[in-house]
Amino acid sequence: MSAPGLRAPQPRTREALSTSSALAGRSLLRVGPVAVPVRRRPVLVAVTLVLLLAAAVVLSLSLGTPYVAPADVVRALSGAGTPYDLVVLDLRLPRAVLAALAGAAFGVAGTLIQSVARNPLASPDVIGVTQGAGLAATVALTSGAAAVLVAPAALVGGLVAAVLVFALGARHGLAAQRFVLAGVAVAFALRALTEVVMLSADPIDGLRAQLWLIGTLAGKGWTEAAWIAGTLAALLPVLLWAGWALRSTALDDDTARGIGLRPVARRVGLAATGVLAAATVTAQVGAVDFVALVAPQVARRLVRAERPPLLCSALLGALLLVLADLAGRRLFAPTQLPGGVLTAAIGGPYLIFLLLRTRGRRS
């Protein structure tokens, strides 16, 4: 019974309160008669990452010898014509675009694989895809194959490694733990084979293979960027589906089947998409470690979500690799460090952070 002076909530009031609670942290995006609730925080994070990425690209085009003022960089990009057009548009822009596209592809690949594996440590460089590409590239570089064949060989090697991981992890419907363990086992085996090939090769060829395995963007540009952009464009319809399908990866199989989903087929599709993106980008820029590992988890924390967000992971991966490549070019100039060295410097402390965080939760 209601207290004197107080009235029970009217139906419209209750409906308004329910709607308000359901839309907490969300805004309605209206397109004509259709209204879709959108979480504000992921949108704000994505917009912020876009702005930071644009600033990082301008900085990458500006710093170097000669130095180009950011205003001149913007004028050159707009086609206004400056004395620095050759430096900005022909020498630095291809590498910056390649870094952004490669980082985005690594972020996408890491998000899909970590979501399927339900493990923040699962990434292409942990489950064997990078090692398969590295072994194939090492064989090509040390066997006298033409340089143009290195990237296709690496792509095939990465895909073959992925097929092996899928074959070993396919029992029990590609269960998350089995999938990761199979990937780790394949990665160790392929890494050992790569070391054997390098040690038995000519020292100069072995050094070339070692440089490729570290991962670098030096000497690369529009051709490699076009391959990655083409792959991402071809995968775009699948990625749009993946952005929706990722919402069900946290469900157990029985619950997923109960609401009419096909969890095994969904996991295979998501993992295959991630593997294809990872193998393609690794074939073009080498084994740039840790971007696919770090970007999804940092993005997840930024948006405060239960699973890595696809778009923010791609943007964060692009930002990380652009900054890593810029630092590699400028920290010890004129000596250039491979971008993979800088990303490894980021990834090592991140792994320590994960271990300490896990230990803190258990204690």
Image (cartoon, rainbow, N blue to C red):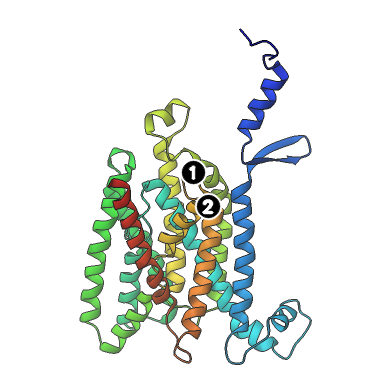
Instruction: Report x, y in % for residue 232.
Output: 55, 60
Vertical position of residue 288 compared to residue 70: above or below: above
Residue identifier under label 2 = 310
| 272 displayed left or right of 200 | right
Q: Residue at x 66, y 31 (%)?
A: 20
Q: Is residue 241 left or right of residue 23?
A: left
Q: Position of residue 26 (x, y in %)?
A: 64, 40
Q: Are marks 1 and 2 in contact (CB under 8 Å)?
A: yes
Image coordinates of residue 214 in percent, x first then y, are 37, 76
Query: On the image, which quarter does residue 133 sit in?
Result: bottom left
Between discs 1 and 2, the one toward the N terminus: 1
Residue 272 in the image: state x and y as whole percent: 42, 51
* Neighbours of disc 1 within 10 Å: few (<14), some (14-19), many (20+): many
Task: Decide if residue 62 is in sight here.
Answer: yes
Q: Residue at x 54, y 42 (%)?
A: 244
**Can you name the residue that lies furthest to the top here?**
1
Which residue in the rendered view is the most extreme toward the front?
Answer: 4
Which quarter of the figure has residue 92? bottom right
Give the number of the disc on residue 246.
1
